[in-house]
Amino acid sequence: MYSRRMVTTMMAVALSLVSALTSAPRAVADEGGKNGRTSLTGAGCGDCHGEFATPSTAVTIEGVSGTSISMSPGETRTFTVVVAHTTQAAAGVGIAVKTTTTGTTDAGTLSPVAGSGLAKKGAELTHSAPKTMVAGAATFSFTYTAPMAEGLVYLRAVGNAVDLDGAETASDVWNWMQPITIDVKATTSVEELGSIVSQKVWPQPLNDATSLFVTGVAPDVYSAVIVNAVGEQLSLGTHQPDGSGMIVFDLSDMQLPKGVYGLILHGSNTTTTSRFVK
């Protein structure tokens, strides 16, 4: 038989275990953020912070007005996620690109821009620490390199606006971004460029000139590509127009044969093209 002391001790241990289990948090929050939170059908930030997504926190991509953009296979572009809230002090973020809107298969390569407050976790990006809001918003910049395979991929993000009180509670309010559909598709020929608005390009023909001038370009960061008549592409890197809206491309190291070419400028929310003759 058990003594009264042994019974008392066993009851105390059992009560301690019940107390520990019932008071344990659903998850342990991480000041540096967690990956795997961007699916609209997942938990989001709700197992550490406010339970449900809240529309008072807005998560958007700077310069993207719709929900779809296009990129060429292997193209690299810079994006900025904005997490906004009118009263919270700081924000965190999670960013991913997947093959579906809710799946877990990664597509392409995400990289943080230096000094943007982002860190790589697996194939995804999260904040390295809560970032202070400025005028009600925190921004996180990164680059994305599209996969070489054509098809649709989905840029996804979740943002958490926090009060910096040191507690992960419902006072922190989070929300998902509406996924951005990225249509990864190569231009197959110069003829496909005819229906897209063109910029002014000179000289025409290029002949032996080593610089190609493009005018009337809106302010943005552009990924530039030359495409020939059969769809072969040559990257010119990233460029920004000067104050007059001009970009100058140095072609001195390129041996372009005579022919008709397309110049494609991929901006953050627009793609502009033009033809030039060599």
Image (cartoon, rainbow, N blue to C red):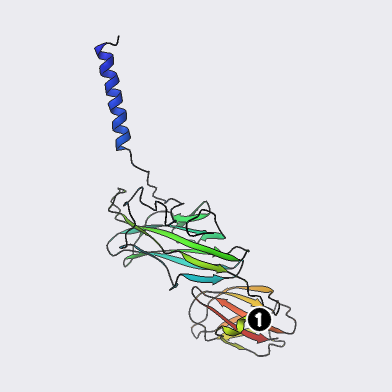
Residue 227 lies in what quarter of the image?
bottom right
In the picture, which quadrant includes the C terminus?
bottom right
Q: Which residue is mark 1?
A: 190
Q: Residue furthest top?
A: 1
- 267 left or right of 274 in image: left
Does the image show residue 115?
no
Q: Position of residue 276 (x, y in %)?
A: 65, 86
In the image, is 108 to the left or to the right of 50? right
Left-right relation of 73 to 9? right
Element at label 1: helix
Residue at image coords 28%, 32%: 19
Q: Quadrant of the N terminus?
A: top left
Q: Is residue 253 left or right of residue 175?
A: right
Q: Amino acid at mark 1?
A: Val
Is 219 rendered above or below residue 101? Answer: below
Extreme residue toward the bottom, this view: 204
